[in-house]
Image (cartoon, coloured by chain):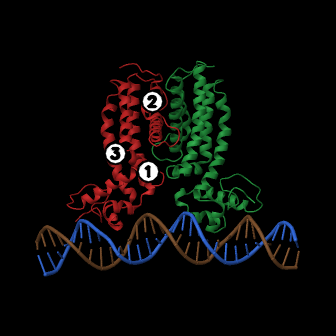
Chain colours: A green, B red, C brown, D blue
Amino acid sequence: MTLDGATGPRASRGRRTSRPTGDDREQAILATAVRLLERHALSEISIDDLARGAGISRPTFYFYFRSKDAVLLTLLDRVNEEAVRALADPLDRVAEDPVRCWRECLAALYTTFHSHRPVLLATAEVRHTNAEVARWCADMMDVWVTRTEQAIEAERARGAAPPGPGSRELAIVLNAMVDRALYATFTGDGPAVPAAEVVDVLLHAWLTSIYQTAEPAPA
Amino acid sequence: MTLDGATGPRASRGRRTSRPTGDDREQAILATAVRLLERHALSEISIDDLARGAGISRPTFYFYFRSKDAVLLTLLDRVNEEAVRALADPLDRVAEDPVRCWRECLAALYTTFHSHRPVLLATAEVRHTNAEVARWCADMMDVWVTRTEQAIEAERARGAAPPGPGSRELAIVLNAMVDRALYATFTGDGPAVPAAEVVDVLLHAWLTSIYQTAEPAPA
DNA sequence: TGATAGAGTCGACATGGTGTTGATAGCGTC
DNA sequence: GACGCTATCAACACCATGTCGACTCTATCA
């Protein structure tokens, strides 16, 4: 007997318990979502589309996921895991070689965003409407802001960066910049920096804001 | 006979022609929209809510506006006119006193955003779903980016700012930063800079990115 | 071996929103 | 006093979401 009150194979966003069958159906739904998102906005995709794509009927979809957005949330978890892995290392080594490490951070975000473009675009689509997705984005952003803040503090502590605005506040606006600029780059929504240059330009703004020169002193 | 193919009092987003009656109904719809947006997200407001609020039935609403988003677009035009007025002057005088003028620009954007918060939040909500709103945002952003770009070029030409990344690309990421950071400030969606500080922090990032020092040389 | 339980499935329905149609009411004017 | 235009709405067609209840299949165990 499952104790978490689940009616579906699991509480949908709850964590894995052993489940013999049905797992492939869940994967089929996720795969269908990714495939459809390559070509269509989330709002253009109906639950019926997802169900049919996975070879099931609409009511059966609800056996696996609570809603369309719950599917997105599951996909988002995957993306996050990948991003966390990619950024952990360069963020820890900022002091060794600031320019290289900050560039690696921004490049890692670029790469993650790029390779999961459909999922992140869908996220942008609903983050202002769906409280749960908004919460998720906020939590993820908070992680990056805090890591950035700590790195800025460390750079100031060792004298590599001069004092300036609060490190947290600075970290927030810099992350906001990356967030929006990458989104625009992959979307063509409004003027966007060409993909080939966007990391360079972001890095410039990032470094000068923190170090107040274009080239911080070497370690 | 109206020549623009309108069925309603005007082509809704088309431009003013003389219209004796019904204008107050249109204003009532707009006023209702603003009032409801103070308390609810756009997605929570139905066309029926707007119609009832204006004292008419739902089909009659369609006589005045093509859709819910068309109402938003009309409100947005008002905001834009105000923003254009507020920013024109400081942008023209950047060379006289860069720090003061850039701050005035950012402060003007802050003020505009703040005083039209409900409308701009609703815009963020649908800009990823509604092509017309997306287009509108893109156009507006393009205006600010171009003005910023020209100002950066001018500063470089007179030797006040050193060379750096392409002025257009820099203008884009700086505007992206303002866009997203102000949104977060007024929304509490994710970590946000306190309202009292946000202009200062944005100004810091803005100045250092352009002048590559915290304090550009006086004119 | 056949009763039982639970996972998995879906037809049919209820709900709630959007947008359209067609009929009508009021009013100025020629 | 009839024509044309603005303005209005009841009724309808449509579509997406989410729920209910009945059904099937399979594995287990007395």
- Inspect this view and state whether residue B46 appears: yes
Across and down, in percent, residue B15 comes to: 27, 54
- Inspect this view and state whether residue A53 appears: no
Classify 10 Å Cα crowding around label 2: few (below 14), some (14-19), many (20 and above).
many
Q: Earlier in the sequence, mark 2 or mark 1?
A: 1
Query: What residue does disc 3 label?
Result: B79
Across and down, in percent, residue A96 comes to: 66, 23
Which is more foreground, mark 3 or mark 1? 3
In the picture, measured across the screen, residue A64 lies left or right of residue D13, that is right
Across and down, in percent, residue B65 comes to: 34, 60
* Residue at (47, 47) in percent of width and height: A189
Across and down, in percent, residue D27 comes to: 83, 66
Classify 10 Å Cα crowding around label 3: few (below 14), some (14-19), many (20 and above).
some
Query: What residue does disc 1 label?
Result: B134
* Residue at (56, 50) in percent of width and height: A132
For residue A100, above or below residue A65: above
In the picture, measured across the screen, residue A38 lies left or right of residue A165, that is right
- Report the amino acid beneath label 1: Ala
Q: Earlier in the sequence, mark 3 or mark 1?
A: 3
In the picture, measured across the screen, residue D18 lies left or right of residue B84, that is right
